[in-house]
Image (cartoon, grey):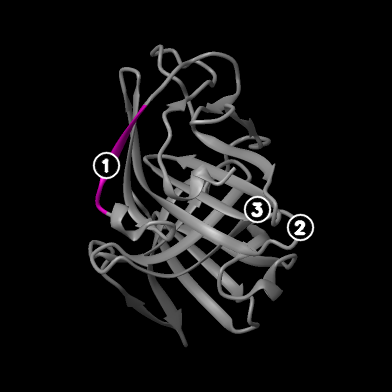
Amino acid sequence: MTILKSTFPIILLTAAVAATGQADIHGAWQHDFKTAEAALTDILLFSSDYFSWTEYETGSGAFRFTKGGSWEIADDHLMLTYEFNTADTAMVGRTVSFKTMMKKEMLHLAGDGEPIIWNNIDKGAPTDLTGAWLMAGRERNGEESRRNTDGPRKTMKILTQNRFQWIAYNSATKQFFGSGGGTYSAKDGTYTENIQFFSRNIDRVGMSLAFEYRIQDGDWRHIGNSSAGEPMHEIWTRRE
């Protein structure tokens, strides 16, 4: 079933109904399926006003594609505006509208074939990191350097209750620089990432990385060693 990679089927969203009468699709959703070549996993993350849709090989974590940007629901339609799309760069900058339907706590995608059912995989309660963040700078040797977060070149991190993904991209040039994601926990000043896919280096899949974190003046201070073992002190700011 390869229709997800290059086409845009009508989406029927079934989720918990919010008090407003609209579907609340915030969180993480997973769809597993098989092709003749491999078993595949698709992950959808919706956090604050931003989303990502990623596919990787189920067993190895080998990266297939990622796409995402901003989203909103108006009446019974879901609008997705793509800031990055490795499956089809021509979609960057475009907004696609999908018909929505509210039923049970499931997410259904209906295309040309059988409806695709997504399971909610978000567990636990939101953390103080749940939401969308932009890389805003670094601290080295006690000196802080900031970057402009309003330009087209961004590194964004999306976190739901227990899932994370970072994506580095340029929406103006449609370039993609890398992405990784999986599950996370954030408790008592320790932020831990469990990597399930990584576009740059499949050897990172399966790694668990622990960092010190704190919220300081509204910023997320992310301190520790990178997956390559390099010391880092990143500064992230919430994306509104």
The residue beneath circle 1 is 95
Q: CA distance from mark 3 to mark 1?
A: 30 Å
- Is 94 inside the magenta-drawn segment? yes
* Three-letter amino acid code at the position of disc 2: Gly
Q: Which residues are magenta?
A: 93-98
Of 46 and 231, the residue lying toward us: 46
x and y, in percent, of residue 181 in the image = 59, 58
Q: Can you say which quadrant of the picture contains the N terminus?
A: top right
10 Å neighbourhood of mark 2: few (<14), some, or many (≥20)?
Answer: few
SS for dot 1 = strand
* Three-letter amino acid code at the position of disc 1: Thr
The residue beneath circle 2 is 59
Q: CA distance from mark 2 to mark 3?
A: 19 Å
- Dot label at residue 184: 3
Task: Give the quarter of the image for residue 8.
Answer: top left
Q: Residue at x 57, y 26 (%)?
A: 115
Q: Is residue 6 left or right of residue 114?
A: left
Of 225 and 221, the residue lying toward us: 225
